[in-house]
Amino acid sequence: MGIAMISPAVNDTETDGEAAARPKALPVLQLVDVRKVFGDFAAVDGINVDIREGEFVTIVGPSGSGKTTLLRMLAGMEAPTSGYITLRGTLINDVPADKRPTCLVFQSLALFPHKTVGENIEFPLKVREVPAAERKRRALEFMRMVRLPDHYYAKNVMRCSGGEKQRVALARAFAYDPDVLFFDEPLSALDYKLKKVLEKELKDLHRESGKTFVYITHSLEEAMVMSDRVGVMSRGRLVQIGTPEEIYTKPATRFVAEFFGEVNSFPVRRTADGGWTQADGGPIVVAPAGDDIGEAATVIVRPETMRFVTGPSSADNLISGRIYNEYSLGSRMLYQVHAGERIYLVEVARAAAGGLVAGDTVTIGWDARDAILVGD
Ligand code: ATP
């Protein structure tokens, strides 16, 4: 499996010095109320976001949430039904893909099969009529950038492994010298280990190249590893965009919190004294709520912030229960604990679990700072 790309317009006019002199804080891409409607269905339903120069922004969301449709509009393969997309201040709603200084890298194969690695990478330079010796010099530079050995220059691309083809396609994307690189799940077809290696390499490449990357994926894990900012989409809308840390520690909604995997959640309501009580009346201590939280909300507690409480140690919230089941996650253990009508999930380091097994009576606890209030 390899990756393909939509080629950008060739940017001949700007020198490296001019590119370096551009102010870094300006948005490269601006989306204002962008919508895409198919029939009476809004696949993308009012997206507003600024993407800054040199940022690595990843859009995640479940299948059907509108990620591909959004990226196709950014890359020029689809025009928005309404709203505005600007690139460095120029409206590009109707500019086709091959007339934009952007490059889309996706997972289906579009390398020239009977050509060498070098010929594939040099293609955009050849179109620009760069002389042969200079082409080779730059192709080798791009190959080193994506960690392909020099002797691969003369290798037939079909004799490369899946991961090597990905690198060839990336090197070719850089040879187009695009302003922005768009990635449509380029790693989704690779095995887990190779994916992990390439995630790190992509992050390094981003830093070394200084280019703006916009990436879409189903995998929040992939997004968290690589990105400066992560946007979470649901039903055509961008529910939240922020740093990986913000998305993890301050999810805007229950949907965002649950996108990270299973969580403990408690419906709560405000009490007269400004505190919170569980909907079924039980006490709960939470971190102070933001202004956007109304009278009713949900408290999210991640399994990894819960712990087993023994001896004199304590926690802001304590509950007694019985272990129903345990699951090994390698270095960590996940426990299902039944307490009253509820099932709690508690994830702890194996060493901290102390050999607990199903049937054991335990006290679980968590602190107010780990009890995240989200609006309903
Ligand atoms: P996945 O992760 O599965 O690729 P996605 O988040 O990329 O999903 P999109 O491919 O953008 O989602 O699709 C969003 C919604 O728009 C889906 O319900 C899809 O069926 C619909 N859709 C996309 N393209 C078209 C089209 N050309 N005509 C009609 N509906 C479309």
Image (cartoon, grey):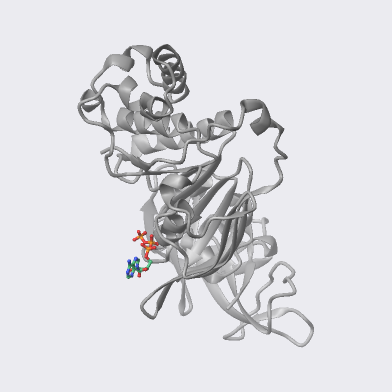
Q: In which quarter of the image is residue 22?
A: top right
Q: Where is residue 303 in the image (x, y as percent from the top left)?
A: 51, 59
From what the image shows, is residue 190 above or below residue 12?
below
Left-right relation of 110 to 142: left
From what the image shows, is residue 31 above or below residue 156?
below
> Which of the two residues, 125 or 337, is positioned nearer the viewer here?
125
Q: Which residue occupies the extreme bottom position in the image?
A: 272
> Which of the two residues, 346 or 233, is positioned nearer the viewer here?
233
From what the image shows, is residue 110 above or below residue 239?
above
Quadrant where the image shows the C terminus = bottom right
From what the image shows, is residue 152 above or below residue 184?
above
Report the residue at 57% width, 28% height from top: 208
Quadrant where the image shows the N terminus = top left
Q: Position of residue 258 (x, y in %)?
A: 49, 65
Q: How many labels does the image show?
A: 0
Report the residue at 61% width, 60% height from top: 49
Q: Where is residue 236 in the image (x, y as percent from the top left)?
A: 46, 69
- Whether residue 194 is visible: yes
- Whether residue 309 is visible: no
> Which of the two residues, 273 or 204, is positioned nearer the viewer here?
204
Q: Position of residue 186 (x, y in %)?
A: 37, 43
Report the residue at 37% width, 38% height from top: 195
Q: In which quarter of the image is residue 292?
A: bottom right
Ligand 1's image quarter is bottom left
> Which of the two residues, 64 or 290, is positioned nearer the viewer here?
64
